Amino acid sequence: MRCWNWLKSLFTVLSVITGLIGQAQLSDSLKYRWAYLEARLQAGVLKDTDYCRAIDSIAPMLEADDSLPQLLSSYQKIAFGDPALHRQRAYYYTYLALNAYNTHKFGSAIYYSEKNNEERIKAGLFEKGDLAHSDLFALSLYYNNRDYAKVIIRLLALAPALRGIPAAVTSGRTSPEQVFVALSILQTAVYTYAKTGDAAARDSAYTLAEAIQQNVRLHPEKYAASFRNYDYLRHNTAYRNELSLGHTGKARDLLNAAMRDVESPDFPARLKADYAVSLYTEAVEFYFDHNQVDSARRYLQILNGHGPNAAYAVTDPGFLLINDSRLLAHEGRYAEAWQALHKAWLLRDSAFYSVSSDRDNNLYALAEAENARAGLLRAEEGRRAAHQSNLLLFFILTLIVLGGLSAFLVYHARQQHRLLRLQGHLASNFHDTVGPMLLYANALVKKESDRYSSEGLDQLKGQIGQIMEAVRGISHDLKSSRLGTISALGRDLNAMLEKIREATGIAFTLTVENGNVILSHFQMTHLSRIVHELISNSIKHAACNTIVIVLKGVPHNLQIDYTDDGKGFDPSAGGGIGLQNINERTASLRGRFELNNNFPNGYTVALSIPLL
């Protein structure tokens, strides 16, 4: 269990480069190359994206250098100046986290790993889930520094999310990546509880890991591509559990199985070296503890990283010194063993000092987070002030608009009042002047008709009656303060139909379309009486249960469709006075009236009149 194990998983290929070259030293050639790129960028010769790509090939090799954060200043400006450069922002935090880890600023390393995790989610490199890669990194860091109390605190916080993984796997709601993170966290849990001697907690973590492993095997269509990674985690976790139970043989077989998983061709190439180092380190400890010195020596030689084994060089010199001391003591070279062990103690004391002094670095990380929070608060305060200014401006503009609207409404009301007075004057003159003339003409026609009856006089009498009706309608329209509309006609009919429904139980459906079309008083009066007559016929003769009326304003015409679910009327009875009145009113409106009788299965009426 080495922090690099999870650090490489978190930081992908960029960090693997670092793992292959070890703790890189700042060289003159790298400094010269970086300065050359910086100069070309400032001169405008090098594009921002080309500069970032070039730095991405250099920065991982400077992870242990104290000046790396300062060197990354131009990279940071470019990455955070362009919203599209999600990857570069993630890489920036990757470099800072690696640098903080290698310079023993562990609090800062955790802080930057969390920022890295956020940016990689935005860039689509990581999946957003309840279990973050930054959690895995923090757990590994605490474990490698033997700060088991902090490991356990974080594990307890992650416990609810971990317990939900088996069900999420079964329902298909979690990704292979989240499963890998969960299994890796549970592996850390088993190792931690084994170190602290908490058998119950270790068994619980191992049981949960096994439940997840079993569930993913039931869904190969989704998880098969990750089975080799899961196999490694399964064998490594089971190894530590069996070792804690004292099952030495089983533990050895599981450790060898984990090694075969890592060495297999289908194991991710970018992870092979680092995972192998972790297993070889565990193998040295295992074989020394069980007095198999030759096997321990073989893996220790690999971890010394000489020649073809350079990729497997262990980064903890204290580990090498302690185990070299054990080999020397086994060979009887006690003085040399003591010297090696003394050096290891000095290194461990130094490491302990670094971990203890990291409290200041934790404060630094918190201060940096607080500084970012303060920046956000300042930005929020600025937005709030701007918002208040906008509200004040909006309020002033609203007052201006409302004042202008009020003035317009007052002016419009006065003009309308004047217009109504003019309309009333015209209506009175029209009614008082034309009305008596028509009455006189009608009286003369009636007198002549009584003396000399003829068809022409009867037609003239009827025409004068229509003219008198039109005059009354025009007078009413001029005096009325509101115009009639199809919607108004619909409201009048609806009120009447409601009363009929309450009195007779006859239901109705009334539909109005394009109700804003204007109707004159003359049209409103005659249309209302036509529909009243139709409703009266339905009640008296049709024996219906439901009446359906549609009022529809179409270009240049008003259409009225009327029907009921009654029997219609008997054709043998002939047309009554009601139908005759309907035809006469339709004619006065210059409209068209169609009746389709389907006795005894009901009838429909279609009425169409021209609009104003």
Image: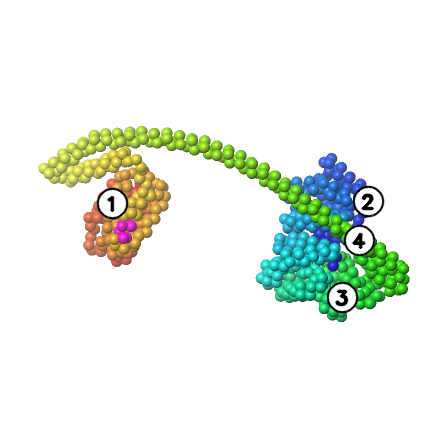
Q: Is residue 172 magenta?
A: no
* Residue type, numbered disc 2: Ser
Q: Which residue is mark 1?
A: 529
Task: Report the disc number at residue 349.
Answer: 4
Q: Which residue is mark 3?
A: 256
Task: Report the disc number at residue 27.
Answer: 2
Q: Position of residue 367 (x, y in %)?
A: 68, 44
On screen, residue 553 versus residue 110, left or right, reads left
Instruction: Please tell me how crowded label 1 is: few (under 14), some (14-19), or many (20+) other residues with Cα within 10 Å.
Output: some
* Residue type, numbered disc 1: Arg
On screen, residue 116 versus residue 424, left or right, reads right
- What SS does tag 1 mark? helix
Residue range highlighted in magenta: 497-502
Q: Residue furthest left?
A: 451
Contact check, label 3 and label 4, Cβ < 8 Å: no
N-term mark: 1 or 2: 2
- What SS does tag 2 mark? loop
Mark-to-mark CA distance, 3 and 4: 33 Å
Q: Is residue 474 visible?
A: no
